[in-house]
Image (spheres, rainbow, N blue to C red):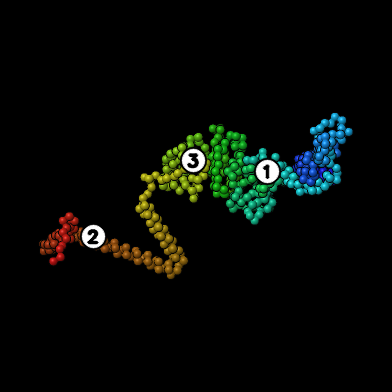
Amino acid sequence: MRDNLLEVITEVSKEKALDRDIMIRLVVESIVQAAKRKLPYESIEGSFNKRTGQIELFQYKEVVDIVDDADNEVSLDEVQEIDPEAQIGDEVEYLIDEREFNRIARSARSIIFGSIREAEREMIVSTFEKRVGEVLTGTVLRSESNGRIALRFLDKTDAYLFRREQIPGENFSYGDHIRVYLMDVNNNPQKPSQLSISRTHPGLLIKLFEMEVPEIYDGIVKIVSAAREPGKRAKISVYSTDPDVDPVGSCVGIRGSRVQNIVNELYGEKIDIVRWNENVAVYATNALAPAVIDELAIDEEAGEIDVIVKQDQLSLAIGSKGQNVRLASRLVGYKINISVDEEEAPSIEEQLTRELERGKEERELLYTGITSGLHAAGTPAAEAAARRNEDVAATKSEDSLGEEIETEAASADPAIEDPEVATTVAKLTETDTEPDTSAQTADPSETTEEKPS
């Protein structure tokens, strides 16, 4: 049994890629734990004999003058037969025999398996704890019904990528290789995964830039911070330690090749590369691009920045559903409040007028498009539309003709030379121009109320 146990340990250590010495230590501890449960001995220890290649168990008895507990005590006279120098209070070591050892080892099977799992956890911790904050490449094993994805790393270690740590809309198949950010390593047997991994963490964006941009890897370009809304948009701020190196251009690459590789890795996530500045006002202005900022006030105590923009820049500053200002706030580390310049802000009447004019233009364009389409089709409706256009033109001609007649009549008045006609016209003019006192509006202060008779 002792020999077989060692063979099993060796085989399992190879299969699980576990250190053999760690496995032996855990198995010895498991057998000692089982022995203390099964045997009446108070003091039991175990060890691995490298010379024989076997695990051994020992019992320790205390040397006493008179024995009261034969399982844990031995008389001085008995011990002195073997060791004349033995004294009361000494401990004597006894090797537990093969029969008892085998019985204990069989009962310790569940404990041994638990020890193997513990060894696996220790191996994972020792392997990955120094890689926290790095990017790992895993192979997809399966996608489970609850949305989590099982990945395997280094051909031995499995971990779960939970739904909350996945970029929305991503789908993976068996055998796919994906990159994840290692957030933490734990040794808690109650957790389903020892490795805490993510594809939504801002650290993944930073590490991908370090891998893609040589200037960042070499330390010429530095990354200050990053903010993400996974799968939608992200902002990352950078600066250069070399005045001859453009930090933004280095990250973008020739024709956007560098940043595009990262966009593809993050499922099409749009990335804004922001030029960092030690002046918070300049930094915040850069972070809110592409919006143009008019005024900016910083409240250091409250941790807020008040930004004023023109009306036509408001939507750019806020972004879709507040996305731009939200990312800028996280990037800069201040709460950003955006408002419109009151002098530039249109009144409600102006806004309504613009909307009405816009609607009128849209209706005219729509009508023109429909009419043109009907003409092109040669339909009866097209002929009707053409007749309507002719009627409109004829109406305009009649209106203009009437205006010409009125103009001629007005210009003909001064040319009247007949004395009788002139006298008649003068009388009519005097009659028409007399003031109508009945039509005048009374002053409210002079108005009196008529009493009923």
**Sequence-first tag of 2 and 3:** 3
Q: Position of residue 231 (x, y in %)?
A: 57, 49
Q: Which residue is mark 1?
A: 187
**Real-space CA distance between mark 2 and mark 3, rounded to the nearest whole angstrom:** 71 Å
Give, as a three-letter code, the residue at label 3: Tyr
- Residue at 69 percent across and 51 percent down: it is 141
Residue pushed farthest top?
85
> On the picture, is 46 further left or further right than 429?
right
- Residue at 78 percent across and 48 percent down: it is 109
Q: Position of residue 311 (x, y in %)?
A: 41, 47
**Sequence-first tag of 1 and 3:** 1
> On the picture, is 307 further left or further right than 218?
left
The one nearer the camera, 228 or 398, is 228
Give, as a three-letter code, the residue at label 1: Asn
Point out the frontmost of discs 2 and 3.
3
Compared to residue 52, the image places residue 396 above or below, namely below
Residue pushed farthest bottom?
380
Q: Which mark is residue 98?
A: none
- Residue at 39 percent across and 66 percent down: it is 386
Q: Which mark is residue 407?
A: 2
**Real-space CA distance between mark 2 and mark 1, rounded to the nearest whole angstrom:** 101 Å
Q: Position of residue 188 (x, y in %)?
A: 67, 45
Neighbours of disc 1 within 10 Å: few (<14), some (14-19), many (20+): some
Q: Position of residue 80 (x, y in %)?
A: 87, 32
Give, as a three-letter code, the residue at label 2: Thr
Q: Which residue is mark 3?
A: 334
Q: Is residue 100 visible?
A: yes
The one nearer the camera, 419 or 389, is 389
Q: Secondary structure at mark 1?
A: loop
**Real-space CA distance between mark 1 and mark 3, rounded to the nearest whole angstrom:** 37 Å
Compared to residue 380, the image places residue 202 above or below, namely above
The one nearer the camera, 213 or 26, is 26
